[in-house]
Amino acid sequence: MAVYTHLGAEALGELICAFNVGDLVSAKGIAEGVSNSNWLIETTGKTGSGARFILTMFEGRTEIADLPFFLGLLDHLADKGCPVPRTIHDRDGASFRSLTGPDGEEKVVALIEFLPGVSVSLPTPAQAHAVGIALAQMHRAVEGYGQNRRNTLALPAWRELLEACKAEDLATIDPALGQTVTEELAFLDAHWPRHLPTGVVHADLFPDNVLMLGETVTGLIDFYFSCTDIIAYDVAVTHAAWCFDNAGRNFDPAISQALLKGYESIRPLSGEERAALPVLARGAAMRFISTRAYDWINTPQDALVVRKDPMAFARRLAFYADPANAGVFA
């Protein structure tokens, strides 16, 4: 989440009025993340008792044609009892709206439920166990979802993003980064699994996309990278996101074991899926190296956004690629 496009109070007020959720009381930009513009919205609510929502304006990396998939998925998962925010439909029944931004560019926005909870920065094994359960429940719940979406941030996109970064710009991040990604992309091309079970996956389940109260998951959020892909890849992404410190220097085996145990209590991994996890985890690391490196180089200086260090995932990649760590997924 982030804020790339700034909206004035009048424009926000008119927009919120279209959703029939009461009058706008306040709007606060959310700085975390790197993809879309987001605000925490407070309104008077329909009954005057107050209500909170999240307003998202979709920026460059989100295809507007994909919004029915994303927003329909939220409603489907919420209907299945998953802790996922519902979409707020406007007075005409639409799940998203268009408006003209301050720069004259056409923008699309959606309003979703605000869920209680906080994102943990130092998860405990019990919290990781709960997240594993919630991820597996989501994978079970999407089996009846009737829509599919190609993963636009799969291996070919990693290569395209990194090739769009000049060698000298990658070197400013780390002198060895260019060689690392070249060698790793070749490895992944040769070893990526092709015949594992697929389904709709979250593909971005970082701690800041999970809301918790104590050891209870109260919200899985930010599904705007969700797609149809290898289900075990989603496990690998979540593992890479949760089992290291932010800098990617320290791996926590207790978090790893708890996350996987929680997941398999709901959806046991097949032998083929488990055997593929080391390669899938290397792919998960490469996915975030590629997008973070591209964003690090290309993020506008005046954007209200926190740039994220690509090297945090280069270190994860080195961990997963080290034969000494092969037993992590055993």
Image (tube, helix red, strand yellow):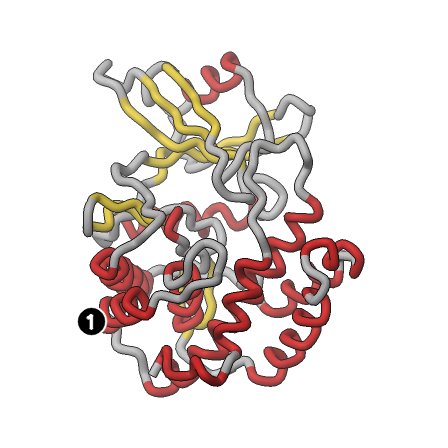
Foreground pick, 277 / 313 = 313
Relative to 279, 21 lies left or right = left
Examine the image and state in which quarter residue 128 appears: bottom left
How far across and how far down the image is residue 263, in percent? Answer: 26, 68
| SS assignment at label 1 | loop
- Image quadrant occupied by the C terminus: bottom left
Is residue 315 shown left or right of residue 53?
Answer: right
Q: Nearer the viewer, residue 285 or 10?
A: 285
Which residue is found at the position 57% from the left and 65% from the top?
314
Residue at image coords 44%, 70%: 233
State the image coordinates of residue 114 (x, y, percent, origin top left).
31, 34
Q: Is residue 211 in view? A: yes
Three-letter code for the amino acid on which mark 1 is drawn: Ser
Q: Is residue 75 visible?
A: no
Q: Specify whether 138 is left or right of 195.
A: left
Q: How many marks?
A: 1
* Position of 323 relative to 298 (above/below): below
Residue at 72 percent of width and 62 percent of height:
175
Image coordinates for residue 51, horizontal then vertical, percent: 28, 24
User: Residue 198: image x %, image y %?
Assistant: 42, 73
User: Mark 1 Cα within 10 Å, few/some/many (few <14, many 20+)?
Assistant: some
- Camera-side residue of 94 and 264: 264
Q: Nearer the viewer, residue 27 or 31?
A: 31
Residue linked to disc 1: 265
Farthest-out residue, front: 250
Horizontal side of 124 relative to 91 (left or right) equals left
Question: Is residue 158 shown above or below 13?
Answer: below
Residue at 80 percent of width and 57 percent of height: 168
